[in-house]
Amino acid sequence: MKKLLIFLSFIFTISVVGATAQNRKSVGAAEVNGTFRDYFDGKYKGSYNEIKILSVGKGKLRVAFELTYPYIDGTGEMSANMGSADGTATIEGDTAVYAADEFGQCRITIKFVRRGEIKVTQAGADSECGFGHNVSASGIYKKSSGKPKF
Protein backbone atom coordinates (compact mmCIF):
# COMPACT_ATOMS: atom_id res chain seq x y z
CA MET A 1 0.00 0.00 0.00
CA LYS A 2 2.83 2.37 0.90
CA LYS A 3 4.53 1.68 -2.45
CA LEU A 4 1.27 2.40 -4.26
CA LEU A 5 0.89 5.77 -2.48
CA ILE A 6 4.48 6.72 -3.29
CA PHE A 7 3.96 5.73 -6.93
CA LEU A 8 0.71 7.73 -7.21
CA SER A 9 2.35 10.73 -5.54
CA PHE A 10 5.20 10.52 -8.05
CA ILE A 11 2.79 10.36 -11.02
CA PHE A 12 0.80 13.32 -9.68
CA THR A 13 3.98 15.40 -9.26
CA ILE A 14 5.11 14.64 -12.81
CA SER A 15 1.71 15.55 -14.27
CA VAL A 16 1.60 18.87 -12.39
CA VAL A 17 5.16 19.78 -13.41
CA GLY A 18 4.45 18.79 -17.04
CA ALA A 19 1.26 20.84 -17.17
CA THR A 20 3.04 23.87 -15.71
CA ALA A 21 5.85 23.64 -18.28
CA GLN A 22 3.38 23.46 -21.16
CA ASN A 23 1.25 26.50 -20.30
CA ARG A 24 3.16 29.28 -18.59
CA LYS A 25 1.41 32.48 -17.59
CA SER A 26 4.14 34.65 -19.10
CA VAL A 27 7.69 34.75 -20.38
CA GLY A 28 10.20 37.48 -19.65
CA ALA A 29 11.87 39.79 -22.15
CA ALA A 30 15.24 38.06 -21.60
CA GLU A 31 13.70 34.80 -22.85
CA VAL A 32 11.74 36.43 -25.68
CA ASN A 33 14.44 38.71 -27.10
CA GLY A 34 16.75 36.97 -29.50
CA THR A 35 17.53 35.49 -32.86
CA PHE A 36 16.20 31.96 -33.26
CA ARG A 37 17.27 29.49 -35.95
CA ASP A 38 15.92 26.23 -37.34
CA TYR A 39 18.76 24.45 -39.17
CA PHE A 40 18.27 22.05 -42.08
CA ASP A 41 19.84 18.58 -42.03
CA GLY A 42 21.48 16.37 -44.64
CA LYS A 43 22.55 17.83 -47.95
CA TYR A 44 21.11 21.22 -46.94
CA LYS A 45 23.22 21.41 -43.78
CA GLY A 46 24.33 24.98 -43.20
CA SER A 47 21.01 26.44 -44.38
CA TYR A 48 18.50 27.66 -41.82
CA ASN A 49 15.35 29.64 -41.20
CA GLU A 50 15.71 32.60 -38.86
CA ILE A 51 13.29 34.56 -36.70
CA LYS A 52 14.28 37.72 -34.85
CA ILE A 53 12.09 38.63 -31.87
CA LEU A 54 12.17 41.76 -29.69
CA SER A 55 9.79 42.64 -26.89
CA VAL A 56 8.46 46.18 -27.35
CA GLY A 57 6.14 46.15 -24.31
CA LYS A 58 2.39 46.11 -23.69
CA GLY A 59 1.95 42.57 -25.05
CA LYS A 60 3.66 43.33 -28.39
CA LEU A 61 6.72 41.83 -30.07
CA ARG A 62 8.58 42.97 -33.15
CA VAL A 63 9.25 39.92 -35.32
CA ALA A 64 11.19 39.43 -38.54
CA PHE A 65 11.21 36.19 -40.52
CA GLU A 66 13.99 35.27 -42.97
CA LEU A 67 13.04 31.90 -44.42
CA THR A 68 14.31 29.58 -47.11
CA TYR A 69 13.42 26.36 -48.87
CA PRO A 70 16.65 24.86 -50.22
CA TYR A 71 16.52 22.41 -53.11
CA ILE A 72 18.59 21.01 -55.96
CA ASP A 73 17.48 22.43 -59.31
CA GLY A 74 17.21 20.62 -62.66
CA THR A 75 20.90 21.17 -63.42
CA GLY A 76 22.00 19.68 -60.09
CA GLU A 77 22.87 23.04 -58.56
CA MET A 78 21.82 24.16 -55.09
CA SER A 79 19.03 26.73 -55.18
CA ALA A 80 16.45 28.11 -52.77
CA ASN A 81 13.05 29.74 -52.59
CA MET A 82 12.92 32.61 -50.10
CA GLY A 83 10.41 34.30 -47.86
CA SER A 84 10.48 37.18 -45.43
CA ALA A 85 8.10 39.12 -43.26
CA ASP A 86 8.49 41.86 -40.67
CA GLY A 87 5.88 43.18 -38.29
CA THR A 88 4.24 43.03 -34.89
CA ALA A 89 3.00 39.99 -33.00
CA THR A 90 0.81 39.98 -29.92
CA ILE A 91 1.86 37.82 -26.98
CA GLU A 92 -0.31 36.34 -24.28
CA GLY A 93 1.24 34.00 -21.75
CA ASP A 94 3.85 31.92 -23.54
CA THR A 95 2.32 32.22 -27.02
CA ALA A 96 2.69 34.98 -29.62
CA VAL A 97 0.73 35.36 -32.86
CA TYR A 98 1.86 37.22 -35.96
CA ALA A 99 -0.97 37.94 -38.41
CA ALA A 100 -0.76 39.37 -41.90
CA ASP A 101 -3.59 39.70 -44.40
CA GLU A 102 -1.77 41.37 -47.31
CA PHE A 103 -1.68 38.20 -49.47
CA GLY A 104 -4.34 36.13 -47.68
CA GLN A 105 -4.91 34.87 -44.17
CA CYS A 106 -1.48 34.21 -42.70
CA ARG A 107 -1.14 33.36 -39.00
CA ILE A 108 2.17 32.35 -37.46
CA THR A 109 2.06 31.13 -33.87
CA ILE A 110 5.22 31.23 -31.77
CA LYS A 111 5.17 29.18 -28.56
CA PHE A 112 7.99 29.73 -26.09
CA VAL A 113 8.42 26.08 -25.13
CA ARG A 114 11.39 26.53 -22.78
CA ARG A 115 14.25 28.96 -22.38
CA GLY A 116 16.10 29.11 -25.70
CA GLU A 117 13.52 27.15 -27.72
CA ILE A 118 10.38 28.10 -29.65
CA LYS A 119 7.90 26.02 -31.60
CA VAL A 120 6.50 27.82 -34.62
CA THR A 121 3.39 26.80 -36.57
CA GLN A 122 2.11 28.49 -39.68
CA ALA A 123 -1.57 28.60 -40.64
CA GLY A 124 -1.95 29.72 -44.20
CA ALA A 125 -0.22 28.69 -47.39
CA ASP A 126 3.25 29.94 -48.29
CA SER A 127 1.71 32.37 -50.81
CA GLU A 128 -0.78 33.70 -48.21
CA CYS A 129 2.18 34.68 -46.04
CA GLY A 130 4.02 36.26 -48.99
CA PHE A 131 6.64 33.48 -49.01
CA GLY A 132 8.11 31.62 -51.97
CA HIS A 133 6.97 28.14 -53.04
CA ASN A 134 7.29 25.57 -50.20
CA VAL A 135 8.67 28.19 -47.79
CA SER A 136 7.24 27.83 -44.29
CA ALA A 137 7.97 29.30 -40.87
CA SER A 138 6.92 26.08 -39.09
CA GLY A 139 9.59 24.31 -37.05
CA ILE A 140 11.51 24.09 -33.79
CA TYR A 141 13.92 27.00 -33.40
CA LYS A 142 16.83 27.38 -30.98
CA LYS A 143 18.11 30.71 -29.77
CA SER A 144 21.39 31.56 -31.49
CA SER A 145 22.01 35.02 -30.04
CA GLY A 146 20.64 37.62 -27.66
CA LYS A 147 18.86 40.89 -28.40
CA PRO A 148 18.44 41.12 -32.20
CA LYS A 149 19.28 43.99 -34.50
CA PHE A 150 16.72 44.77 -37.18
Image (cartoon, rainbow, N blue to C red):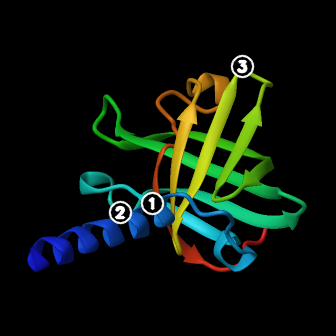
Residue positioned 53% across, 75% down in the render: 115
Q: Give the Cα separation between the discs numbered 3 and 1.
A: 35 Å
Labels in figure, total: 3
- Which residue bears the numbered disc 2? 15
Residue positioned 52% across, 41% down in the render: 121
- Mark 3, mark 1: which one is toward the viewer? 1
Q: Look at label 2 and name its amino acid.
A: Ser
Badge 1: residue crowd in 10 Å (few <14, some 14–19, many ≥20)? few
Q: Which image quadrant is residue 24 in?
A: bottom right
Residue positioned 49% across, 43% down in the render: 138
Residue positioned 9% across, 73% down in the render: 1
- Which residue bears the numbered disc 3? 104
Left or right: where 116 falls relative to 8: right
- Which residue bears the numbered disc 1? 19
Left or right: where 99 falls relative to 115: right
| Mark 3 vs 2, N-terminal side | 2
Badge 3: residue crowd in 10 Å (few <14, some 14–19, many ≥20)? some
- Mark 3, mark 2: which one is toward the viewer? 2
Q: Position of residue 36 (x, y in %)?
A: 56, 65
Q: Secondary structure at mark 1?
A: helix
Q: Give the Cα separation between the discs numbered 2 and 1.
A: 6 Å
